[in-house]
Each structure stands twice: as C-alpha cells, then as structure tokens.
Amino acid sequence: MIVRERDAYAQEVIAATIDRSALSAEDRAFATLLVLGVSSTWGTLDELIDRSLRSPKDIKADVRDALRISAYEMAFLHKETYAVVDQGVELVRAVAPRAAGVGNAALRSLARLMPAFPFDDPETDLAAFARLEGFPLWIAELLSDEMGPDAARAFMRASNEPAPLFVAENPLRAKEGEVLAELERAKAHCVAVGTGEDRVSGCWHVTPARVLSDGRIRRLIGDGKMLVSDASSQRVANLVLPETEPSSTLEIGAGRGTKTILLEGAAVRRWGHPLASHAAVDNHPFKIELLQRRAAEYGIDDIEGVVADATDLQATLGERTFDFVFIDAPCSGLGTLRRHPEIRWRLTLDHVKELARTQLALLRSAAQCVSPDGTLAYATCTVTRQENIQVVKAFLESPEGRAFRLAPIGGKSCFAPLLEPGSPDAHFAVTFRRVSE
C-alpha cells in the first residue's frame, strides 16, 4: 500500500518498516518476500484480479492491494488455494469490511483460473512467458527484439532472482583489509569480485545479506568505512577514470553521491589521493546539500556543488572546462530490477524514448565542458539500445560529438555485462576522448 500510495521503492519501504519491526526473523523474511514479489508482478496480478471480477473498476485501491497479495500467493508461491482464499477474505475484511463478500467471490474465481495460468505455453508464447515472469508484455517484446528471444528470457528470469549483496571498502576512511576483517568477524562469507586485471579493488560479494544488521557492520557503514554498492557500479567508477590523473572533474547525475564516493575511492587507490577540483551538478539546491553531506561522511569534504540545468551547462558554467566529465545518466533502470522490481510496471515506452532524448541532450551539453584531450564518460544502469548504443551513436553524429572518439574501456568498446543469477547488475558505460584541434 505504501509503495503504491507514495510511489516509493519497495526496498526502501522494507528497510523503514519490516526491517525495524518486532517480527520474528522468519516472519520478516516472508513479509519481505511478499512485498518484493507483489511489486515485481504487479501488472500480472492486476490482470488476474480483473479476470476474476465482474466490474474491476468498482473495487477500491486498498481492496485491490489485499487481493494482489492473495493472487501472488496463488500464482507465484503456489500455495493451496483454499488456505489463500480464507486468509485473503480476512485480509480484505480488515481493510474494508463491506468488501469481504466481493473479495470472497473474486478469490474463489481466481482459484478456478489458476490451473490455466499463464493461459498459454510460456515456451512458445511470449505473452504467457511475460505473465509467468511478471513482466509487461511491451518490455518482453522490446528485450526480445533487441537481445534475441533466448537472451531476453534469460534476462527476465535473472531479474527475478534475489539481489546479491556487494560492498565497497572506502580507502578514505578504512585501513586496507579492515572491512574484510570486520565482515569475517561477523561470520560473513566474503568473495573478492573479479580476478587479475578485472579485479575490483575493495569490492566483496558478501553472504548472508543479514550480516548488515550486525552492530559491527552498521558501525562500519556509519563511520564511512564501508559502502553498500553493486559491483557493476564499483566497476564503472574504476573503468571511467582517465589513464592520466585529471586536474579537474565534473560529475553530472551524482544523486545521493554513491558514484561520487566510488570515484574518489578509485582515485585514492590509483593516485594516492582524492580527485582535485571535483564539481557535481544538480538542478535542485537541496540535492546538492544532501550529496555534500553524504560525501563528507565518507571523508570527501571539498565537493563543489553546482546548481544548473545539466542539459544547458553553458548557461551556468560559461566557458569553464574540465579534464574529466562523467555523466551518470538518468535511465529506465532495467538493469537493476532485482533491487527495484516495481520499475517495470511504472515505466512506459514513451518514458524510455524521453529518457533517451534527455541523455543525448546531457551528452551534447557536457561535451562542451571537456578540455582538449579530456575524457567524457557516459554510464547507465539499463539494457535498452535506445538509451545506450543508440544514444552513443547519435552523440557521435551530433555537432558536439564530432570532436570526440570512442576510447577503450576495460579493453573493449563498451562496458555491458550480462545479467545472470548471482551476477552484479546490468550496467552500461563508454568513454570518449576529445580530439585535439
């Protein structure tokens, strides 16, 4: 209900309510499963509910919330329908006593539908597969067109796997090996991410995730020594840094500062000290204040906040240029569905197209802020070609992009890891080099 009413992220609601509740560990785990499960299959559940009602538009939102939980238990947890119906009716009665009769009829009708779900063979029918995996059909079709049917199906399955926990040791606060030692004292199993040249320094895959509730680990985070961050985010921060230490950095799309902290940590490991002259852009002053406050908690006190429209940086920055410009672009976030499952049901194709237009505008504006021979980096946490490869191509063909050439990133033309069970999230990144005139 909170996720729907506030348009919130399920994980944030879980952290603020379930994780802080007096429920037993077993009940917290089941409540978390229900919240994430309902959030990820929202549209499919609504289709099932609508098929079970004579007048779907007549039921109120809180009654539909209750019915979604029961529908999820039937369709995706495969619980005995008689038990789900009984519990579901009581749940409807608790939120809307007068709707108990409607809820009872809807749930009994839904139980009769279950043997036919997902209403065709998911191996041959994409719509049935999308229902089975809790995806809107338009996303399933888009992924299938862009990746191919097999890769798209693998991506959708992997997107419904539990999100793995990765952490980053912050060299600005923690001594080398301190984070690992504390995690192991807390009985966590830690595996280094990557090997050889692909090793992400200070990045660990940690199990079980509940170790984050240990007092010692909470202190690590509170002291700014450890950061919870997906390994792909950490990898991007390492890969986009120029080979030569930049004398000035401009960061666009810093958000809450996770990439800011990761970039600074990567710089410390590479050059022995933080980035010089690091400026961050946002169009809201309060977001700049939040970023600077969080960065300071991790030992970064000199981030210059710039309030500006990042699609028209020249209006604020004039002719000011930077050796390194990094765009962590706003995107559809489809590479992070394990962490934000509700995204798939809030997104539309028009939204993806609008994001791509904004991303291109950001690149064209930022390009004018790059010094001669400087580096421009672009990153997203999505997998659509419209927001990734096609934006890159459109930029290189633009008047501003003609002064740039793609530069290798991690020995390849782009960073675009596949999403697999247990893997980091699916991110995308490229780097450009400004060609001297």
Image (cartoon, rainbow, N blue to C red):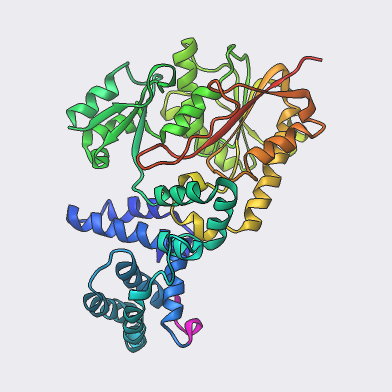
Observer-nearest of 124 and 64: 124
Residue 196, placed above or below residue 3: above
Residue found at x 21% / y 38%: 214
Q: Quadrant of the N terminus?
A: bottom left
Q: Quadrant of the C terminus?
A: top right
Residue 226 appears left or right of 393: left
Does the image show residue 218? no
Does the image show residue 124? yes
Image location of residue 241, percent across then percent down: 56, 20
Image location of residue 15, percent across then percent down: 33, 50
The tally of labels here is: 0
Tell whether position 82 is magenta.
Answer: no
Observer-nearest of 164 and 16: 164
Q: Determine which quarter of the picture holds residue 39.
A: bottom left
Residue found at x 28% / y 34%: 206
Image location of residue 155, percent across then percent down: 46, 47
Q: Which residues are magenta?
A: 55-61
Image location of residue 359, percent across then percent down: 67, 41
Q: Determine which quarter of the picture holds residue 397.
A: top right
Residue 172, placed above or below residue 421: above
Residue 369 appears left or right of 16: right
Residue 192, placed above or below residue 41: above
Residue found at x 59% / y 47%: 146
Q: Determine which quarter of the picture holds residue 303.
A: top right
